[in-house]
Amino acid sequence: MNELLKEYAAVNSLLTFLIGLIIGNRLAINRDRRKEFNDSVQPIRSWLLLELNDPSPYRKVPSKIEVDNFVHYLPLWKRRKFEVYLTELKKVREENSYQDDYGKVFYQNEEDIKRIVDKCLSYTKKK
């Protein structure tokens, strides 16, 4: 009977170790994914927040590589909608811009831009 308890204790210790190893590995992978997502979202979110507060046709938009890096980390069901919003934002920015007599570019209706930027921002919350 005593030997049987020793065997159960050894099996229990081994199983506990293996379960701890698997859980620790999953937690480390999730932590790395969160860090990568947060790193990729930073330039997109910064740009969107600036556009929400003060839309400007002169503000540098994130590069295609930065956008692609961010979209890569979005879940599949969110990717398509975010890309649609970005395309809509680009279109509205082009349609709303006009040039005055001095050559300076302005937006006619900033509210349309802010509305779409707000939709895009909902996808950029840090994890």
Image: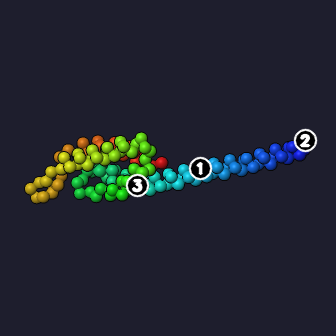
Q: Residue at x 33, y 50 (%)?
A: 48
Residue 37 position within the rendered picture, expressed as x and y whole percent measured from the top left: 46, 52
The answer to whether the residues at label 1 and label 2 have Cβ atoms under 8 Å apart is no
Q: Secondary structure at mark 1?
A: helix
Return the disc, 3 or 1, that comes first in the chain's sequence. 1
Q: Residue at x 10, y 58 (%)?
A: 102
Q: Nearer the viewer, residue 56 or 93?
A: 93
The circle on residue 35 is none
Q: On the picture, is 97 further left or further right than 80? A: left
* Vertical comparison of 60 with 114: above or below: below
Residue 78 position within the rendered picture, expressed as x and y whole percent measured from the top left: 40, 42
Counting other residues with Cα less than 10 Å from the Cα at mark 1, is it few (<14), some (14-19), or many (20 or more)?
few
How far is mark 1 from mark 2, CA to CA? Answer: 37 Å
Q: Nearer the viewer, residue 81 or 50?
A: 81
Q: Amino acid at mark 1?
A: Arg
Residue 23 position within the rendered picture, expressed as x and y whole percent measured from the top left: 63, 48
How far is mark 3 from mark 2, CA to CA? Answer: 60 Å
The circle on residue 1 is 2
Q: On the picture, is 90 further left or further right than 22? A: left
Q: Secondary structure at mark 2?
A: loop
Q: Amino acid at mark 2?
A: Met
Circle 1 residue: 26
User: Can I make out residue 115 in this image?
Assistant: yes
Q: How is the image coloured?
A: rainbow
Return the disc, 3 or 2, that comes first in the chain's sequence. 2
How many numbered circles are shown? 3
Task: Give the residue furthest to the left.
Answer: 101
